[in-house]
Image: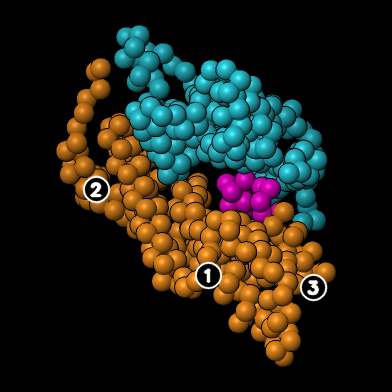
Chain colours: A cyan, B orange
């Protein structure tokens, strides 16, 4: 402990910060894309059209039963195959870019379950009221159900995003340079595992701890008293 | 599509004289072993922490809360790397050398995954105990039980039944989380998956097989715990979901 060398951290800070930026970019992209696709999946799952229900249920169950690392690697290898099939050309997309896609698709399954329980938490009378006012299905969802579902589920959606933020570290599997990947690459070069991995752990802890406290506070503030 | 499907490659010989399906079976074995052992660690420690956080003793609550905060807010892969590459440097030198040279990899990995999962289980055990009415504890104390006895005979038997569905999903998650231990050298299913892809490039076949394997592992765990849930159900007591009061 006595030879903990802070200069290793300061010297490499720019590289680490670059990694952290990538981690945040993937997190935000996957959060927005995942919530959008997840909401659509939840609507499909709750719709009265049976094939749509099946599709959504299959999608969610498959992605929720597979380890994320495996999906990261599989998509990294399969996306180029699919692109080649469509365009007939070889398009190298790279590890860093494939992660945006993988996380969006993967997290959609988890966000979809959250949105489903959010939609189901809305009393049936609300939907009936929407129809009674002459709203179509789309209007009822858009103006009545979904705004309330989002509000009720906001803390859970944000908690899932904190998990997603931590999970981005698994792009280690395909060698992309996220925050952890950056620290790992510096370790390979400078052989200072103690400084590097501790920094990553501490920074992750500070960010996630602060965010989860904020979510907790938000939760008590936006709770609707019924 | 010019992808060359070849399901028979599973029966081809590998460099080490085994067949590819042997690699998968051995990976499955390691995944099962590491997951179950970690689950045992996590259940034990998680229960202790969960109980600690519901006691009237402030410092026990604080300790339990701090544990959960630390272990839930650092990614699993970072935690594993800490156990493997940082902790041995920080402990006394002799112990560090022993950890690096003599302690089998899988023990460190099991402890790492177990401690990570314990934080989640502690949350659930705590929630289970807190969902019981205060009267349960008072009744126990009134009967002359010590604080510990109210846990042992009154509160924990109820709390475990209430949180069993949540524990089931945690027990299913641990199979998925165990895939991360490949990064610290455990030859489990995901490691074999990666290795087979590197050797054969039959990405689609192996992805299907490994996905199904994880699916089956989680499904078997789910069935076993559903059986436990049915066997331990107290007649007349509605547990699980919301209406348990």
Between the C-alphas of marks 1 and 2, the distance is 47 Å
User: Is the N terminus of chain B in the top left, top right, bottom left or bottom right quadrant?
Assistant: top left
- The local crowd at label 2, few if under 14, some if 14 to 19, many if 20 or more residues have their Cα within 10 Å, is some
Residue ID at (60%, 82%): B153
Q: Secondary structure at mark 1?
A: loop
Return the residue nearer the eye: A197 or B179: B179
Image: magenta residue range: B70-88
Label placed on residue B237: 1
Between the C-alphas of marks 1 and 3, the distance is 27 Å
Is disc 1 in the same subunit as disc 3?
Answer: yes
Is disc 3 in the same subunit as disc 2?
Answer: yes
Q: Earlier in the sequence, mark 1 or mark 2?
A: 2
Q: Compared with residue A98, is residue B84 higher up or lower down, i.e. above or below?
A: below
Label placed on residue B21: 2
Q: Is residue A77 left or right of residue A107?
A: left
Tag 3 subunit: B
Where does the image place residue B102, in percent across and percent down from the top left? 52, 66
Q: What residue would you read off at disc 3?
A: B56
- The local crowd at label 3, few if under 14, some if 14 to 19, many if 20 or more residues have their Cα within 10 Å, is few
Where does the image place residue A219, in percent across and percent down from the top left? 75, 42
Tag 2 subunit: B
């Amino acid at each position: 402990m006595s030879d903990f060398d802070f200069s290793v951290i300061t010297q490499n800070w720019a590289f680490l910060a670059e990694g952290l930026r990538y981690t945040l970019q993937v997190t935000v992209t996957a959060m927005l894309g995942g919530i959008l696709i997840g909401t659509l999946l939840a609507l499909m799952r709750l719709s009265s059209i049976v094939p749509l229900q099946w599709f959504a249920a299959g999608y969610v169950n498959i992605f929720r039963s597979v380890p994320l690392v495996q999906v990261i690697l599989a998509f990294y290898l399969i996306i180029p195959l699919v692109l080649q099939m469509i365009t007939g050309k070889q398009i190298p997309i790279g590890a860093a870019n494939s992660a945006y896609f993988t996380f969006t698709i993967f997290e959609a399954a988890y966000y979809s379950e959250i949105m489903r329980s959010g939609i189901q938490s809305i009393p049936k009378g609300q939907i009936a009221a929407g129809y009674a006012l002459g709203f179509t299905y789309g209007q009822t969802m858009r103006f009545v159900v979904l705004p309330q579902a989002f509000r009720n589920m906001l803390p859970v959606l944000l908690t899932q995003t904190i998990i997603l933020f931590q999970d981005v570290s698994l792009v280690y599997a395909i060698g992309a340079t996220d925050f952890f990947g950056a620290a790992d690459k510096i370790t390979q070069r400078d052989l200072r595992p103690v400084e590097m991995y501790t920094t990553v752990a501490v920074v992750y802890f500070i960010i996630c701890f602060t965010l989860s406290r904020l979510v907790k506070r938000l939760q008590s503030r936006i709770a609707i008293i019924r | 599509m010019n992808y060359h499907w070849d399901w028979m490659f599973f029966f081809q010989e590998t460099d080490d004289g085994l067949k590819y399906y042997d690699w998968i079976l051995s990976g499955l074995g390691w995944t099962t072993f590491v997951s179950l052992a970690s689950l045992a660690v996590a259940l034990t420690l998680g229960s202790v922490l969960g109980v600690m956080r519901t006691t009237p003793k402030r410092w026990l609550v604080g300790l339990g809360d701090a544990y959960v905060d630390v272990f839930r807010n650092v990614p699993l892969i970072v935690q594993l790397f800490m156990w493997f590459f940082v902790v041995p440097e920080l402990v006394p030198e002799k112990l560090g050398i022993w950890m690096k040279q003599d302690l089998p990899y899988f023990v460190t990995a099991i402890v790492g995954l177990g401690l990570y999962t314990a934080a989640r289980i502690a949350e659930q055990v705590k929630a289970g105990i807190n969902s019981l009415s205060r009267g349960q504890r008072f009744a126990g104390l009134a009967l002359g039980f010590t604080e510990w006895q109210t846990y042992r005979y009154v509160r924990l038997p109820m709390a475990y039944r209430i949180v069993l569905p949540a524990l089931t999903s945690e027990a299913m998650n641990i199979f998925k989380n165990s895939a991360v231990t490949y990064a610290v050298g455990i030859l489990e299913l995901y490691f074999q998956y990666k290795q087979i892809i590197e050797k054969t490039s039959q990405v689609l076949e192996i992805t299907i097989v490994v996905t199904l394997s994880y699916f089956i592992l989680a499904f078997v765990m789910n069935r076993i715990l559903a059986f436990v849930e049915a066997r331990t159900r107290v007649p007349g007591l509605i547990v699980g979901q919301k209406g348990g009061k």
